[in-house]
Amino acid sequence: MKLLGLELVEVCEAAAVASAHWIGRGKKNEADDAATSAMRLLLNRLPMRGTVVIGEGELDEAPMLYIGEELGTGSGPAVDIAVDPLEGTSLVADGRENAISVIALAPRGGLLHAPDMYMEKVAVGPEAKGCVDLNRSVVENAVAVAEALRKPASEVTIAIQKRERHEEAVAALRQAGFKVMTFQEGDVSAAVATAVPGSEVDMFYGIGGAPEGVVSAVALRCLGGDMQGRLIPQDRVEADRCRRMGIKDCRAILRLEDMVRSDDCLFAATGITESPMLQGVKRQQDQWLTHSMLALGRKRQMYFLKNLRAQPAVEEIGSAREQEPALCV
């Protein structure tokens, strides 16, 4: 698994640079398609037997990187793959901050097959590991984190997505004296930031996508952080979907170990636009400067990498999408 680490960074770089062509152009679908095409092209060249468990959707919803798609050369380790080629499609379309490309790997059977539905999530870094519990209120969790970090509430920052469903939690936290940093999009960035040294984020809380929750959980396991999740099916159809994916009690609290079942996991991300954790893609003449993060679960190691890379033409990526056969055997 460790040997795939730098290759995963290259995969994220390619997706980030491909989508960077669309920054500020108001076309989020084109940006997502470019990132997805570039990511799949390189994943199919890696020495692995990969299966997408968190991807762009079901087979009838996504032409590539769909759940169940097999990727890789057919040799090497059997792995579960969780991808988000472009987290923040509208961020790229509008030229706003916090868009990234992410991928996570674990041994086959190591990742929760999370259905595409809402999940309540809370995440913290290593110093507050074991302090949060979704059975408690968001304020109670914030108090526990403050005690673990030995900080007064006024110095503890909680990241929450700016949505109407979070207004009550934001008001309660601020009433209790905590600082709340709101963001428009980027659940993964906000959750992972809790475990990155130097980050201003001490806790992440919110109700967002379950697939993003699993991707975040891989990074937090790699970095020694902690996370809990609880699925929120909106109707019987979504509840049935949970059961079909092997989740018997869809309202049970999912701990970090339930979402990522092995320390032998990898997480990689590349910035597309500027974010608190990663710098965005920058063009330098005929090359592109990228800023990426790689986390290795078994050794709890984290690297930040800058790289100058050439970018294949958009036409080349599109051609590969149409012509390249599946490489798995």
Image (tube, rainbow, N blue to C red):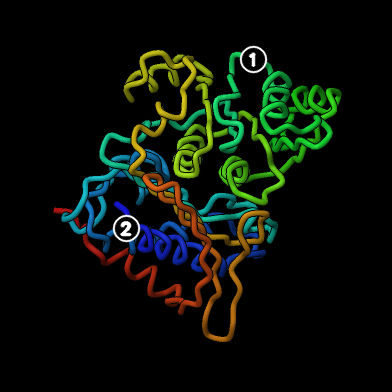
| Residue at point 24%, 56% (across, down) | 72
Image height of 168 relative to 178, above or below: above
Residue closest to the far bottom: 285
Residue 30 visible here: no
Check disc 2 and report the residue beneath it: 4
Contact, mark 1 vs mark 2 (Cβ under 8 Å)? no
- x, y percent for residue 308: 50, 77
Image height of 100 relative to 306, above or below: above
Image height of 163 relative to 34, above or below: above
Three-letter residue code for mark 2: Leu
Q: Which mark is residue 136?
A: 1
Residue 275 visible here: yes
Q: Seen in the image, is 79 located left or right of residue 88?
A: left
Residue closest to the far front: 150
Q: Circle 1 sits in a helix, a strand or a loop, which is it?
A: loop
| Residue at point 20%, 59% (across, down) | 73
| Residue at point 68%, 38% (across, down) | 202
Q: Circle 2 sits in a helix, a strand or a loop, which is it?
A: helix
Camera-side residue of 233 and 154? 154
Q: Which mark is residue 163?
A: none
Few, some or many C-alpha atoms within 10 Å of disc 1 (few <14, some 14-19, many ≥20)?
A: few
Q: Earlier in the sequence, mark 1 or mark 2?
A: 2
Q: Seen in the image, is 294 located left or right of residue 4?
A: right
Q: Seen in the image, is 289 located left or right of residue 145?
A: left
Three-letter residue code for mark 1: Arg
Camera-side residue of 130 and 185? 130
| Residue at point 34%, 70% (across, down) | 319
Q: Seen in the image, is 175 located left or right of residue 275?
A: right
- x, y percent for residue 102: 48, 52
